[in-house]
Image (tube, rainbow, N blue to C red):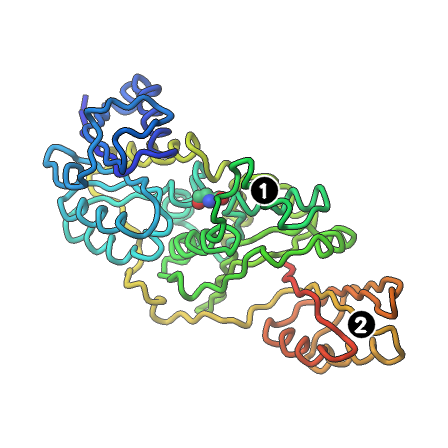
Amino acid sequence: MRKVSVGFLGCGNIGCGVWKLLNEFKADILHRSDVEFDVKRILVRDVKKKRDQVVPEELLTTDPAQVTDDPEIEMVLEFMGGETPATQYMLRALEMGKTVVTANKMALALNWHILQAAAEKHGSGLYYEAAVCGAIPIIRTTLDSLMSNRIEEMMGIVNGTTNYILTRMSQEGSDYAEVLSDAQRLGLAEPDPTSDVEGFDAAYKLSILSSLAFHARVPFDVIYRQGITQVSAADIAFGKELGYTLKLLAIAKRSGDVIDARVHPTFIPDDHPLASVNGSFNAIFLHGHACDDMMLFGRGAGSAPTASAVVADMLYAVSRDTPRHPTFRNTNELAEGLTVTDDWHCSFYVRLTASDRPGVLARITACLGDEGISIRNLMQRDAVDGHAQIVLITHDAGECAIRKALAAIASDDVQVESMIRVER
Ligand code: HSE
């Protein structure tokens, strides 16, 4: 039996979940892996704070060095969240030769290159299954199980808060602001929801996932990001009529040496596997040249699901003779030889308010035609006060072309209300 001394950095929701799982599952862990994790020290901000789990007070400390610098501690688990000081503490632990297991997508996405360099230099392990989509084993699946594939595309619902909001907007026909404040009241959205609703959280996760999928670094700052704050009940309702479901998707595609990486509200056909992923669930749909289509579905957040991934990483780490590192050179620059395009191709949903006068529709279609954009579907509602609602879906077109066409369409007669990308 191997005994591994462990230190926690943070003991909030996730830390308590890990504490609970390590205790409840102790006998199974011993039976399956012949290992016993012994939690020696836990860094907290406030020793007296009431916690979900009864953690012995003598383990608590407010001094990070008691975790990162203790020679007896072999493994450091980081649950603090945020970029700093979590990055610095993890860095210290790696420099001290300890294995680090983190659930922190922000610190990893922004400082992966620094952490990995330290891990490699000091022979330490760095594991982060819990940082992307909670319990879903997408990191290990991408790193190991799909090693035999060239992954060409990943599309994921990687943020549970926004999926919960969009699901309720869709089911109830409610407005964004109304559902958000209800979700905040229920504790399902943060008091400051910016990271979730503006797509930052999803973009951090996409940076990590696409780098692993493409075996090439895709830094956070090359990812196009648009959140859900401008999504309207009207667009969701029109989409439904046309057979589409709206999701905040994190999308990464690779064609040869050109990639696109983006987070934005996206319509997908109602029969797409991702369309039925509702509430706070997460899912990643991917396509590999050999495995074809695949989807992983599960809980992307929460105390126990995140703990599931953390403890799995702990067991994976102790089962290895040498640490597992990604295959790519991690400099936080886009991998040499790759380019990121902002001119991706997909269909587009467009909603316009137009004066109900002769020639207006002809001008709209001409502006689209001038950019080589063909209309697949068009719907016009009876005019109210002389203004008609026009909704159209294009055939495949380029992002730059649709932007140019919409700039030309916008006029005294026509207001562009919304443009939403449509993926198949
Ligand atoms: N805030 C995230 C979500 C969970 O709503 O999915 C942690 O990344």
**Of 207 and 372, the residue lying toward us:** 207
Residue 365 appears in the picture as rendered: no
**Of 20 and 292, the residue lying toward us:** 20
**Residue 349 % position (x, y):** 70, 63
Label 1 sits on residue: 164
Residue 266 appears in the picture as rendered: yes
Q: Is residue 115 left or right of residue 252?
A: left
* Residue 423 vertical position relative to residue 31 in the rendered view, above or below: below
**Which quadrant, please, contains the N terminus?**
top left
The residue at 54%/48% (across/down) is: 157
**Of 258 and 415, the residue lying toward us:** 415
The residue at 20%/33% (across/down) is: 61
Residue reaching furthest to the left: 71
**Residue 40 % position (x, y):** 19, 28
Label 2 sits on residue: 354
The residue at 81%/65% (across/down) is: 389
User: What is the three-letter code of the residue carrying label 1?
Assistant: Tyr
**Residue 116 % position (x, y):** 24, 53
